[in-house]
Every structure is written in structure tokens, then in C-alpha cells.
Amino acid sequence: MITPRNALLLVGSAKKSESTSASLGSYLAERLQQYRLTVQTVHLHQVFRTATRTAALLEAVDRADLVILAFPLYVDTLPYLVTSALEQMAEHRRGLGETAQQLVAIANCGFPEAHHNDMALAICRRFAQEARFEWAGGLALGMGGAINGQPLAEAGGPARNAIAALDQAAEALATGHCVPEQAIKLMARPSIPHWLYLLFSNWGWRRQARRYGVHNRLKARPYQP
Amino acid sequence: MRATILDGSRKDDTTLNGVRQILAEELLAVGWEVQPFILHQIKIAYCLGCFECWTRTPGVCRIDDPARNITAAIIRSDLVVYLTPVTFGGYSSELKKALDRSIGLVSPFFASIDGEIHHQRRYARYPRLLGIGGLLHADAESERLFSGLVARNALNVHAPAYAAGTLIVTAGPDAIRATIRPLLRAVEVC
């Protein structure tokens, strides 16, 4: 165990704005900076545009004492951008001996139950093992739509548990420890009732569709055999 | 009956070619039509996370590229096969890129299934799902993760039946057939 001096935040959302992954990752980064860590942030959607940026990412990973992976759940697991980044990182680090570098992952999904993220976090843990990182833990958030890409400090009640969980995680990670179990449980705890989240989510889809004038076609079957 | 094979091999990785060929032979032998997509050979963009396939052009991704054809092929199939090198226990990036682009096949609205929230169906019927993962060597943890991921996918894509298995890519044709046949039986192909 070493006390990290610097961290690299990798944001795995393809969204250019209103990314809940960025909200969660940025909050943890800010808290780590308060513990005097230097934090570099990389948005993976900007990385793969050029070979130079990809090489720079791999170098940044090599330099980091702590790598933070923040991503949305897509189809039960990591989105393409993150999967591709992990493949390249693992290839780059093949043959590397044991390192003291740590990896922590923060997954969020639109389902109310945080446990939908469990498979993705298990895959991150497996990646850590193959790419010679020390696994520092995984945090899973459900009801990501309630934060909807807002800075956590401005997201009100729906972000309450996430803020408390990330505060605890930052304190542990800043001293080289793993994310405490209490923080993992807190992050996964629903911050609003299921029924209310479902009500707002379903209303939100209809509202967006109405804006595009397609609210009567939401159940369309364009590829019906 | 129609099967769509999504081959998620990465560029320059030919280790699953033999598996894909044997799988196609087994399906053709029982009278199925087979449509393979070798994904790394098809230029498709990655999902932008915009959700417009749910809210603006329901069921169709806003990006007009061959991923639309792949999505259409999936829903018009009786069986979809995810063939992929097992990557940290999950799917390769090539397969994941295609799957991320297919979320318009379900509805944005939520429903409770066995006490857990999932997306509602968009279509009346969905294909069965078979996941086949290639490994360089036996690895119980990767096998467990891979099977678990296919099971979660089957739930979320409303597959009426599913099966998952892994095989060693360097195995001979007989060993590959011996792995594939029970999986095909499990998804009621034969």
C-alpha cells in the first residue's frame, strides 16, 4: 500500500455534456484534490480520435498512482468506449510485474436498483487483475437519471447518498486504502422511493418524445419482421 | 428459422474463425438460415448515449450506418449468437459496440420482471440468445462472469431461451463441436 500522490479520472460516458459519470467522477476528484492529490481528467470519447491521444492516455495511466474509472452501464456491462480503453490498457501493460497502482470504479445505471451494475464492476475487477492494478473497490449507483448529469452539489436529495459515499471513498483512497464497505452500501442505497423514480422516469421519456412530436409513436416497431 | 451470428473478434484475431464456421455448419445442417456479421470488418460508430432511439426516432438509431442493419437482423432472427473472445470475463469491444447500438429494440419504459426493474418490450417476440466465448486457456472465473453476463442480457433483451458457454480456441474441431451441440440444444435449435 502506498499513499497516492496523483490520480487519473477516466470518464467513460459518450455524452459531451450532462453526464452522470462525469458528475460522480468529478466530485470524487475534487474531494481527492482536497487531500492534496493531483488529479488529471480524461474523457474517453475524446481519446480515440487520434493515435497521439491514445498514446498519451496510456502514458497517463502508467504515471497514475490511482486510476478512477467512472462510466454508465450499457446493456448490462461496460460501454464500448470503456471496453475498448481497457483492452488497450491491458495490452499496453502486458508483461508488467506487480505494481502498487490502484484502480477504483464507479458505475451508474438508469435502473432503480444499483445491483444491475454488479456484473460491470466484476469485469472491472477482473481487468484490474489482468492489467496488474490493485483493486481498490467498486461503487454502484442506481437511479442515475435522478442526477442526470448535474454537479452533485446542485442535484439535491437524489445525490445525497452518493455525496456521502464518495466523501468516505475519498478519505480512504487518499491514504492508499480500499473503498470502505460502508461507502459501497451508501452509494447503492436508493435516495428516493422506487415508485417516485419510476413515475418521473416514464414521464420524462414521454416529455422528451413530445418535444420531438413523436409521443404517439413511442412504441413503434420499425424492424417488425 | 434464422440465426444471426455476431462475431466480435478483434481485428487480426482469427482464433474464432473456426468456431464460427463450425457453428454455421451445425445450424445449416438442421435447416437454419445463417447470417454472420464479422463486426470488425463493418464500420459502425459507437453509441452516443443520446437516447434518441427511444425519444426522437423510436426504435431507430439516429446514426445512419450498418449498425441499423445489424439491429434489424437481430430482431428478425429466431436465434442470435454472441461469439466473442472473453474479455475480462465479458464481451470484446467489437461486440459491445454493436450491442450498445441496438438498445432501440426495447422500450424506454420500465417494467417489473420477477421483482426487478427492466425495460419493457418493444416487439412482441425476441430471438433466443446464445453466448459463446473464446478463451486461450481454461479460466473458471472468466467462464463464470461470461455466463453471468449472458444471463443478465437474456433478461434485459427478453430472450425466450438462452445458453452460454466458453471453449478453448485452440481446441480441435471435434472438441468445438462437442461444446457447441449441447448449447444449441439448450436454445432448442435441435
Image (cartoon, rainbow, N blue to C red):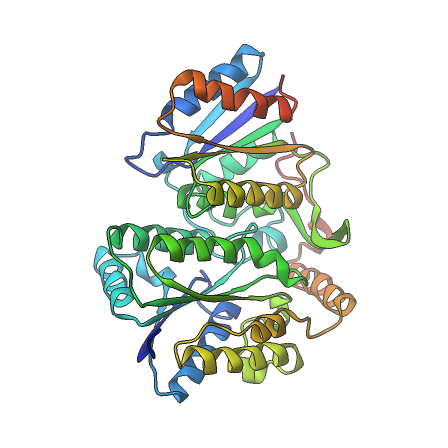
**Residue A134, image quadrant:** bottom left
The residue that appears at 30% across and 80% down in the rendered structure is A5
B26 vs A223, left or right, is: left
The residue that appears at 67% across and 32% down in the rendered structure is B161
From this view, report whether residue B142 is shown above or below residue A200: above
Quarter occupied by the N terminus of chain A: bottom left
* Residue B145 visible to an observer of this rendering: yes
From this view, report whether residue A5 is shown above or below residue A206: below
The residue that appears at 35% across and 55% down in the rendered structure is A85
B63 vs B107, left or right, is: left
Residue B179: horizontal and vertical position, in percent? 51, 24
Residue A216: horizontal and vertical position, in percent? 73, 52
A15 vs A189, left or right, is: left
Residue B42: horizontal and vertical position, in percent? 38, 36
Q: Nearer the viewer, residue A32 or B141?
A: B141
Residue, far front: A1
The residue that appears at 68% across and 65% down in the rendered structure is A204
Q: Nearer the viewer, residue A25 or A4?
A: A4
From this view, report whether residue A216 is shown above or below residue B26: below
Residue A26: horizontal and vertical position, in percent? 45, 77
